[in-house]
Image: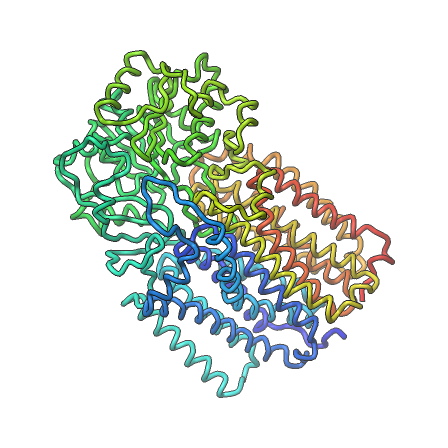
Amino acid sequence: MPSIDRPDGRLFGGIFLLCLATLMYEIALTRIFSVLMWYHFASMAISLALFGMGCAALLVYLRPGWFPPERTRQIAGSCSVLFALSVALFFAIFVLFRLQPLIGFKVLSFFHQPFYQPFKQGFYEQGMALSMLPALFALYLVTALPFFFSGLVLALLLGRYLADINRLYFWDLLGAGIGCLLIIVLLHLLGGITAILAIALFGLGAALFFYPPAPAPGRRLFIMVAGLLLLAAAIGNVTTGFAEIRFVRGRYEPNLLWSGWNSFSRVAVYPSQSQEMGQAWGLSRNYRGPIPEQLGMVVDDTGYTTMFRDGDGRYDDFFRSNVIALPYLFHPLAKSLVIGPGGGKDVLVALAMGASEVRAVEMNSLIAEAVNDQFAAFTGKLYRRPKVKLAIDEGRNYVRRSPESFDVIQASAVFGRTAPAAGAFTLSENNLYTLEAFRDYWDHLSQDGILTISRFIFERETLRLVSLALALLEEEGAADPGAHLAVIKERGLANVMLKRSPFSPEQVETLRREARSKGFRVVYLPDERGGDGLFNRLIASGGSEAFHNSLPFDLSATTDDRPFFYYMLKPSDFIKLFSFPEKSSFEDRALLTLRNLLLVVTVAVAVFLLLPLLIWRRQALREEGALHRIVYFSCLGLGFMLIEIGLLRRFILILGQPIYALAVILCALLIFSGLGSLLSGRLSSGREQRALPRILLALVLLSNLYIFGLPHILDLAMTASLVTRCLVSVLLLAPLGMLLGMPLPVGMKLLHRTPDGIPWSWGINSATSVWGALIAVVLAMNFGFTITLLLGEMVYLLALLVVVLPRRQISAN
């Protein structure tokens, strides 16, 4: 029976704080997973949240007697305390890793290359990939505990106060939306590990709101003591770092020199090994001069760069002897743009080659802080030198807005795989390497300018760079595309050069002579086209469709709609991953991770969500209207994730920094969805029956405008100021966000006459969202974001069909 009491301000405040803490914990996990394992695990955080909430909702549905209605608020308060304690338990794991590094190594070794191999490609044996599964499953369950307790509160309250579900859902989404903004501040001020404790404090605050105004003295005392302990631990970690992560590139690093967190990364500096200094990437094997002292710097777990000791010109020959210096042979006083300079190697090469001006565009302010401030005496404040101008910005976005042209645009082994705080939502694949990005670079080259991008030759991505160049030259109508290209390598590092004008015979000979003197190897030059190598065959084909179809992997040019530069499988081959190949490239670790996540999620959902229903509530599945409720709320969970992820990825291009996409887009989407839920509460019971089909129809029709019209609108706004771009993004999301927030609360009221089935429907919505978060990744990787968004629209269309079926078929219990 519906409850006779109504929710008050304290209850709404508790929901707000708990959902705020839940969303912050979810995003904090993306950061910590990126540092300890790979950024690919960031995609797991969102499925963790939804899985935990789905399990909680199922428990409420299967065992309602455990949760008496008259004790709903006390239970909500206790669950909030358990949420806080389970979050604090996650912090305790890092204390254990610090005290017992061997334990940390054993846990994390599943997720790392066994040996650091700078000039060779590592491989995964089948056993290594399979051994990840138990650890991954255990990690999944442990980190899902806070979401379980949070979901328990929401399931109880939604079922208890069905008549006020619109307002409850509003405060839920409002808290989550504000959490998107607040976690950015916490990560910047406290770092990822200490932020965990702050999130636990918010959970305790939610408990105080949920408990009656005068809770038992012992209960209040416990909360106060727990809060003081969490606060003391947070202060202690900020001042002493007793629980900070000291793992770098998969190994324990006791001599960590410095580390810092911001909202989208963790940067650590450590002493380079002698082997790393003597075998600098791209350095001529014939070089016999002095080698500068170096410090290693790693962003999260995979983005590696190096800082060099300032030698006041002493080490110029060291930098001139690198394969990435070749483009400057034709521009001795070059105006250069370096995208992602990191520790400064590309900048030092440009200066050593006589560049008149170097524009360094670095997305991560922590890297600039390390070079200019933390290790200023070591680097000589590289980015403050007279010829160097530093811009903290995303490279692609900066180039698009710049009115200047450059003689050399350079990007050497830029790791676009480093996850932002939005990692779980935006996927953060590389928009530096798409056809549209190459168009932006081309338009900002001088008449004889050169775009030079260096990557490891054993990576197939180097071939994809050539494919992108060929696709661009085809659009440009180049008479001889091969004359604009040159590829030269030094051991593992290859320099791919795309020249706006054709290489002249004299310039080709200069490259050949320089390669011979430095011991570099020519992979491709315009006058050497007769070879049988893959590069020669690709260029000779002009990047034709027939050539791409003949290859066992996908080298086609990536686009802004499908920006997965590192994904080389053809769509039909993705399924073959589930046959567990005996040996896989280490570069395929993302795919193996995604496969394992799909397996773990599928098993977890089947065991914890579906199997209990079949065992204890099989009869409920046969009740009239049950199938329609299952389909309807499944559609809402899956459709919302497909649309949300597709939209978030597209807004990265206009906002530049991926973190802005999280702060602005996800926050706006959640808050406007909450407003939509609040507005839908004005519908009377009679009007809901007529309004729901119209809401879903409007959502489907409006989605088409976003799918096909949004890219053109965003392109026009690209050159506006950041404030303007943020405002445009918020305004664009307002109508869609409000519509997305209406179907769930209206459907809950319409399809349930009593609150008994509310937890079940909430759990169904969560379970399908778990799959949706990962399925959206798979769809986008193989077919692009437009297809992902269109499928999201079709799922909502299916929900519309369920609603418009004859009323007798959707009568609810």
Q: Is residue 310 left or right of residue 200?
A: left
Q: Quadrant of residue 354?
A: top left
- Whether residue 115 can be seen here: yes
The N terminus, quarter of image:
bottom right
Is residue 532 shown left or right of residue 713? left
- Picture coordinates of residue 492, whole percent (x, y): 33, 35
Q: Residue 109 at x, y = what percent?
A: 40, 57
Colour option used: rainbow
> Is 439 located above or below residue 747 in the figure?
above
Q: Nearer the viewer, residue 125 or 494?
A: 125
Q: Is residue 659 above or below residue 495?
A: below
Tell me the residue at 69%/65% (across/down). Answer: 611
Relative height, residue 472 to residue 123 (above, below): above
Total marks drawn? Answer: 0
Q: Nearer the viewer, residue 53 or 231?
A: 53
User: What quarter of the picture does the C terminus occupy?
Assistant: bottom right
Residue 325 x/y as whole percent: 26, 28
11 relative position to 492: left or right: right
- Residue in the picture at 60% in, 56% down: 770
The residue depicted at 36 percent of the width and 60 percent of the height is 191
Q: Is residue 185 visible?
A: no
Could you say which quadrant of the image residue 102 lies in? bottom left
User: Left of 258 or right of it: where is 465?
Assistant: right
> x, y (%) of residue 624?
84, 62
